[in-house]
Image (cartoon, rainbow, N blue to C red):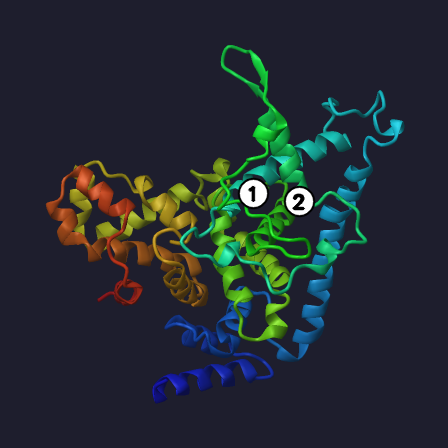
Amino acid sequence: MSTSYRNRIQEFKVALGEEKINLKALRELCFSGIPFEGGIRAQCWKVLLNYLPLDTSLWESFLKKQRELYSQFLKEMIIQPGIAKANLGLAREDVTLEDHPLNPNPDSRWNNYFKDNEVLLQIDKDVRRLYPDMAFFQRPTEYPCKLILDPQNEYETLRRRVEQTTLKAQTVDRNRSGVTNVSSPGKALNLYPSNEYEVLPNGCEAHWEVVERILFIYAKLNPGIAYVQGMNEIVGPIYYTFATDPNGEWKEHAEADTFFCFTNLMSENRDNFIKSLDDSQCGITYKMESVFSMLKEKDMELYLKLQEQNIKPQYFTFRWLTLLLSQEFLLPDVIRIWDTLFSDQDRFHFLILVCCAMLTLIRDQLLSGDFTTNMRLLQDYPISDVHTILTKAKELQDGS
């Protein structure tokens, strides 16, 4: 470790050790990248995402309160409904004329249960595919949730709900002619390829299962937006950063802390996921057009070339912007980009600068390429050195 890097770590320790953190000074430090050592990055993200208060003397009581609140969410939204479902149908009074499994009434507990299952199945499908090139999300967590795995709690777990719901969907199959085929349950048990659906022994849970729980709780608490595909790509890097924290005391609470940081980040980014807002000034269309407006200002020749080839911003910037570039780079590089995005006061304005920098850095290839070549370049971005991209974005910001 170089002396300059050691000095940089010390600067972060001093900034985070203040009784009242100077947010402006911390942002400036974080903008150039945050060290992983000593759990510095995880702590900085918690401050930058407006989770931890700037007054460090409040941290202990604040974290205790938030983690207890998250435990309450688990009880109310997973354990209690799971107990109710485990008992549902055992007594005749659970199926009445007023409330039964086919009841269309939105207040029906059966109806709510089935609606939740639809959301859960979508989340489940997405979290299993999270960063498939890394083994991390398939591995068991060191800190499985005791509340969820407590053998005293006889209830239907999320894992069981997914198995049951998928099993029902797989065993009764209606083909396009309207003929219903009921396949043998044995055949339907192979719901996922073995490498994707390896059930861990009792008392263990994989990291992806923790992410699934976070997203399910978020969907339940935010029914207006619920779950939209892509949210898994936003929560993944936050959870990974907190769940690999070298400080065990923080790592143990990665699930609760991730939930609140993800919720705060989504409060700034959620408009990108709401289709009805697409064309409003806070929606994704406006942001996509902002990338091209900035390109026009910084590199007119490249802008005209893309216009001439009818390459519209929505063909590639939709994914860049909504997923905060999480699918364009490897996870360690995504985390480095997020250090800068989170530390910029106009968080998502700098993201537009980064997107513009990505275009100008491959301008020669784009100027010489045809439509097909250019679309391939933009959908599978060729530069992997994020330091070069961030440096260029800063130059664009400074007007050079």
First along the sequence among labels 2 and 1:
1
- Amino acid at pointer 1: Asp
Between 113 and 56, which is closer to the camera in this rendering? 113
Pinpoint residue 303: horizontal percent, then vertical percent: 20, 47
Pointer 2 residue: 158
Query: Vertical placement of 24 versus 329: above or below?
Result: below
In which quadrant will I find the C terminus?
bottom left
Residue at 51 percent across and 40 percent down: it is 274
Circle 1: element type: helix
Left/right placement of residue 357 relative to residue 258 reads left
Residue 68 in percent (x, y) is at 73, 62
Q: Are marks 2 and 1 in contact (CB under 8 Å)?
A: yes
> Would you call the spot at circle 2 few (<14 residues within 10 Å), some (14-19), or many (20 or more)?
many
Q: What residue lies at 43% left-to-right and 61% top-to-bottom? A: 346
Camera-side residue: 376 or 189?
189
Please tell me whether residue 158 is drawn above or below residue 298 in the rendered image: above
Q: Is residue 11 above or below residue 390?
A: below
Residue 53 appears in the figure: no
